[in-house]
Protein backbone atom coordinates (compact mmCIF):
# COMPACT_ATOMS: atom_id res chain seq x y z
CA UNK A 1 0.00 0.00 0.00
CA UNK A 2 2.85 2.38 0.76
CA UNK A 3 4.59 1.78 -2.56
CA UNK A 4 1.66 3.01 -4.75
CA UNK A 5 1.28 6.12 -2.56
CA UNK A 6 4.99 6.86 -2.84
CA UNK A 7 4.87 6.40 -6.64
CA UNK A 8 1.85 8.71 -6.90
CA UNK A 9 3.60 11.38 -4.80
CA UNK A 10 6.74 11.10 -6.96
CA UNK A 11 4.66 11.46 -10.13
CA UNK A 12 2.96 14.58 -8.76
CA UNK A 13 6.29 16.17 -7.79
CA UNK A 14 7.74 15.35 -11.23
CA UNK A 15 4.71 16.82 -13.02
CA UNK A 16 4.81 19.99 -10.89
CA UNK A 17 8.54 20.43 -11.51
CA UNK A 18 8.07 19.99 -15.25
CA UNK A 19 5.21 22.49 -15.28
CA UNK A 20 7.21 25.08 -13.35
CA UNK A 21 10.21 24.62 -15.64
CA UNK A 22 8.01 25.13 -18.71
CA UNK A 23 6.56 28.32 -17.23
CA UNK A 24 9.99 29.65 -16.33
CA UNK A 25 11.17 29.07 -19.89
CA UNK A 26 8.31 31.05 -21.43
CA UNK A 27 7.82 33.94 -18.99
CA UNK A 28 10.65 36.35 -18.31
CA UNK A 29 10.69 38.55 -15.25
CA UNK A 30 13.71 40.60 -16.29
CA UNK A 31 13.87 40.68 -20.06
CA UNK A 32 14.59 44.13 -21.46
CA UNK A 33 11.68 45.95 -23.06
CA UNK A 34 13.80 48.68 -24.60
CA UNK A 35 14.34 49.23 -28.32
CA UNK A 36 11.05 47.78 -29.55
CA UNK A 37 7.79 49.36 -30.66
CA UNK A 38 4.99 47.96 -28.49
CA UNK A 39 1.52 48.17 -30.10
CA UNK A 40 -1.52 48.08 -27.84
CA UNK A 41 -3.69 44.99 -28.35
CA UNK A 42 -5.77 45.07 -25.15
CA UNK A 43 -6.51 47.66 -22.51
CA UNK A 44 -8.19 46.33 -19.39
CA UNK A 45 -10.43 43.55 -20.68
CA UNK A 46 -11.14 45.28 -24.00
CA UNK A 47 -9.35 44.12 -27.15
CA UNK A 48 -8.00 46.93 -29.32
CA UNK A 49 -8.24 46.47 -33.07
CA UNK A 50 -5.04 47.25 -34.90
CA UNK A 51 -5.52 49.50 -37.93
CA UNK A 52 -4.04 49.33 -41.39
CA UNK A 53 -1.51 52.06 -40.55
CA UNK A 54 0.85 50.98 -37.75
CA UNK A 55 1.80 54.61 -37.12
CA UNK A 56 -1.81 55.37 -36.09
CA UNK A 57 -2.09 52.48 -33.61
CA UNK A 58 -1.62 53.19 -29.91
CA UNK A 59 1.94 52.25 -29.09
CA UNK A 60 4.96 53.01 -26.94
CA UNK A 61 8.73 52.64 -27.15
CA UNK A 62 11.10 52.46 -24.18
CA UNK A 63 14.61 53.86 -24.73
CA UNK A 64 17.11 54.85 -22.06
CA UNK A 65 15.00 56.33 -19.29
CA UNK A 66 12.36 57.74 -21.66
CA UNK A 67 9.13 56.34 -22.99
CA UNK A 68 7.44 57.83 -26.03
CA UNK A 69 4.63 56.90 -28.32
CA UNK A 70 1.16 57.52 -29.65
CA UNK A 71 -1.85 57.05 -27.40
CA UNK A 72 -4.51 56.86 -30.11
CA UNK A 73 -5.03 60.58 -30.68
CA UNK A 74 -1.96 62.23 -29.18
CA UNK A 75 1.80 61.85 -28.98
CA UNK A 76 3.09 61.11 -25.49
CA UNK A 77 6.43 61.15 -23.74
CA UNK A 78 7.73 60.72 -20.24
CA UNK A 79 10.12 58.98 -17.92
CA UNK A 80 10.17 55.37 -16.80
CA UNK A 81 12.15 53.30 -14.34
CA UNK A 82 12.68 49.55 -14.74
CA UNK A 83 14.31 47.23 -12.23
CA UNK A 84 13.81 43.50 -12.66
CA UNK A 85 10.12 43.13 -13.45
CA UNK A 86 9.23 46.38 -11.66
CA UNK A 87 8.18 49.19 -13.98
CA UNK A 88 7.08 52.73 -13.15
CA UNK A 89 5.93 54.94 -16.03
CA UNK A 90 5.42 58.69 -15.75
CA UNK A 91 4.73 61.36 -15.32
CA UNK A 92 3.61 61.56 -18.94
CA UNK A 93 3.16 64.61 -21.14
CA UNK A 94 1.01 64.56 -24.27
CA UNK A 95 -0.03 66.75 -27.13
CA UNK A 96 -3.60 68.04 -26.88
CA UNK A 97 -5.12 67.16 -30.25
CA UNK A 98 -8.89 66.85 -30.36
CA UNK A 99 -10.05 63.26 -30.50
CA UNK A 100 -13.40 63.34 -32.32
CA UNK A 101 -14.05 59.58 -32.23
CA UNK A 102 -15.60 58.81 -28.79
CA UNK A 103 -14.46 55.16 -28.88
CA UNK A 104 -10.88 56.14 -29.71
CA UNK A 105 -10.99 58.88 -27.05
CA UNK A 106 -12.12 56.38 -24.38
CA UNK A 107 -9.41 53.90 -25.45
CA UNK A 108 -6.77 56.64 -25.26
CA UNK A 109 -7.83 57.62 -21.74
CA UNK A 110 -7.76 53.98 -20.62
CA UNK A 111 -4.35 53.40 -22.22
CA UNK A 112 -2.76 56.47 -20.61
CA UNK A 113 -4.29 55.46 -17.27
CA UNK A 114 -2.89 51.94 -17.68
CA UNK A 115 0.59 53.28 -18.46
CA UNK A 116 0.58 55.54 -15.41
CA UNK A 117 -0.85 52.80 -13.18
CA UNK A 118 1.82 50.26 -14.13
CA UNK A 119 3.84 48.78 -11.26
CA UNK A 120 5.31 45.71 -12.98
CA UNK A 121 5.46 43.90 -16.29
CA UNK A 122 5.79 40.42 -17.70
CA UNK A 123 6.83 39.12 -21.10
CA UNK A 124 5.49 36.05 -22.82
CA UNK A 125 6.93 35.68 -26.28
CA UNK A 126 6.34 38.97 -28.03
CA UNK A 127 3.60 40.12 -25.64
CA UNK A 128 4.22 42.67 -22.93
CA UNK A 129 1.71 42.76 -20.07
CA UNK A 130 1.58 45.89 -17.93
CA UNK A 131 0.36 45.08 -14.42
CA UNK A 132 -0.83 47.10 -11.45
CA UNK A 133 0.54 46.71 -7.91
CA UNK A 134 -1.86 43.81 -7.25
CA UNK A 135 -0.64 41.97 -10.37
CA UNK A 136 -3.78 42.62 -12.43
CA UNK A 137 -3.18 43.16 -16.15
CA UNK A 138 -3.85 46.77 -17.17
CA UNK A 139 -2.80 46.49 -20.82
CA UNK A 140 -1.24 44.05 -23.27
CA UNK A 141 1.07 45.17 -26.05
CA UNK A 142 2.71 43.28 -28.91
CA UNK A 143 6.15 43.91 -30.39
CA UNK A 144 5.40 42.10 -33.64
CA UNK A 145 8.75 40.27 -33.37
Image (cartoon, grey):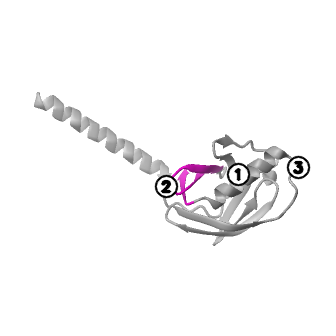
Q: How crowded is mark 3: few (under 14 residues within 10 Å), some or many (20 or more)?
A: few
- Name the main secondary structure of what is drawn in magenta: strand
Which residue does the image show at 48% across and 57% down from the upper left? Answer: 29
Q: Which of marks 2 and 1 is nearer the N terminus?
A: 2
- Does the magenta-highlighted stretch encompass residue 38? no
x and y percentages locating residue 106 in the rendered image:
76, 48
- Number of disc labels: 3
- Does the magenta-highlighted stretch encompass residue 122? yes
Give the CA separation, mark 2 to mark 3: 39 Å
Given this view, does label 2 or label 1 mark the residue nearer the observer?
1
Disc ID at residue 68: none
Residue at the left extreme of this rendering? 1
Q: Are marks 2 and 1 in contact (CB under 8 Å)?
A: no
Q: Residues within 10 Å of mark 2 (few under 14, many from 20)?
A: some
x and y percentages locating residue 19 in the rendered image:
38, 42
Q: Are marks 3 and 1 in contact (CB under 8 Å)?
A: no
Between residue 123 and residue 42, name the one nearer to us.
42
* Residue behind mark 3: 100
* Residue behind mark 2: 28
Q: Which region is colored magenta? A: 119-141
* Residue behind mark 1: 110
Q: Earlier in the sequence, mark 3 or mark 1?
A: 3
x and y percentages locating residue 111 in the rendered image:
70, 53
Give the CA separation, mark 3 to mark 1: 16 Å
Between residue 66 and residue 125, name the one nearer to us.
66
Can residue 53 be seen here? Answer: yes
Give the CA separation, mark 2 to mark 1: 26 Å
Secondary structure of residue under mark 3: loop
Q: Is residue 104 above or below residue 116?
A: above
Amino acid sequence: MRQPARLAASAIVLAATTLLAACAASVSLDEPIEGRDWRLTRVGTQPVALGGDPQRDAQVRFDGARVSGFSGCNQLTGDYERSGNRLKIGPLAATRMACTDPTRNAMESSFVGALQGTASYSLLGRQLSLNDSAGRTLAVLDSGR
